[in-house]
Amino acid sequence: MLIYQVTDEAFRPYGRVVEGYKVDGILDALSKTPVPENVIYTPREDAIHQAENAEEVGIGLFGGMPFQFGYCNGHNTKLNCLEFHRDSEFNLGTEDFILLLAKQSEIISGRLDTSVVKAFRVPAGVLVEVYATTLHYAPCHTDPEKGFQVLVALPAGTNTDFRPEGGANPMDQMLWARNKWLLAHPDSDEAREGAKIALAGVNIDIAEDIKD
């Protein structure tokens, strides 16, 4: 699979590189979070909120709206699912990491073919915005020895417990948590847990693509 850089023109429809913020304090706090062999996600991590300049960065990113700084860490090379929110998500890694992305407009009749998914490498220490219209999920590592530690900055309450019954719109069937619409591949753990199967095609695995 071709892996683009976030500085490539190809990234423009999916997000942008965010410059100007002092993120050293956030990176230092992030570096102290665990890196398991699987993938873990914490919506809010107080130690990151207390990091130097974190409050100023959050206010700038979300324009004064309540926000949460959490993390997604571990080891991963697979797509498994895609999700979207009603708001942008911001990511920042202690090491290089890869995002597998698609566009909400590529969902056709409630399904998305994984052949449209593109891969983008984010350099360590570079803050990126992933637009609300961009489908994304867990990062992938570039070095299996190091894994990934990635900041996940979102509006407060996103990805927390919320599972409504029913819904008037077919997209309501994808609502998996608060402000989290999830499209699962049939091979994923999330599908086995009841998530809406809405990804068709190959469950992308970039393990071979990141080898030297």
Image (tube, rainbow, N blue to C red):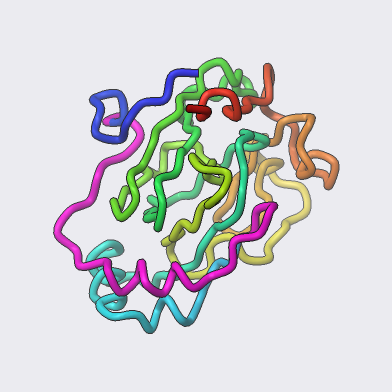
- Residue at image position (73%, 56%) is 164
Q: Out of 114 and 205, give the one closest to the viewer.
A: 205
**Residue at image location 67% in from the left, 42% down from the top:** 174
**Magenta stretch?**
12-40
Q: Residue at x 64, y 37 (%)?
A: 81
In the rendered image, the vertical position of residue 80 relative to residue 132, given as above or below: above
3 magenta-colored: no
Magenta region includes residue 14: yes
The residue depicted at 50 percent of the width and 33 percent of the height is 100
The image shows residue 92 at horizontal and vertical percentages of 37, 55
Q: Tell me how many marks there are.
A: 0
Query: Does residue 71 lie above or below 53 as drawn?
Result: above
Observer-nearest residue: 36 or 195? Answer: 36
Image coordinates of residue 40 in percent, x first then y, are 64, 59
Placement of 130 over or under 162, stated as above or below: above
Classify residue 190 by image quadrant: top right
Q: In which image quadrant can residue 83 be found?
A: top right
Q: Residue 18: give x, y in percent of width and height.
A: 23, 51
- Residues 6 and 113: in front is 6
Q: Is 82 on the left or on the right of 61, as rendered?
A: right
Residue 44: image location, x then y, percent: 52, 72
Residue situated in front as seen by the camera: 54 or 25: 25
Q: Is residue 178 left or right of residue 22?
A: right
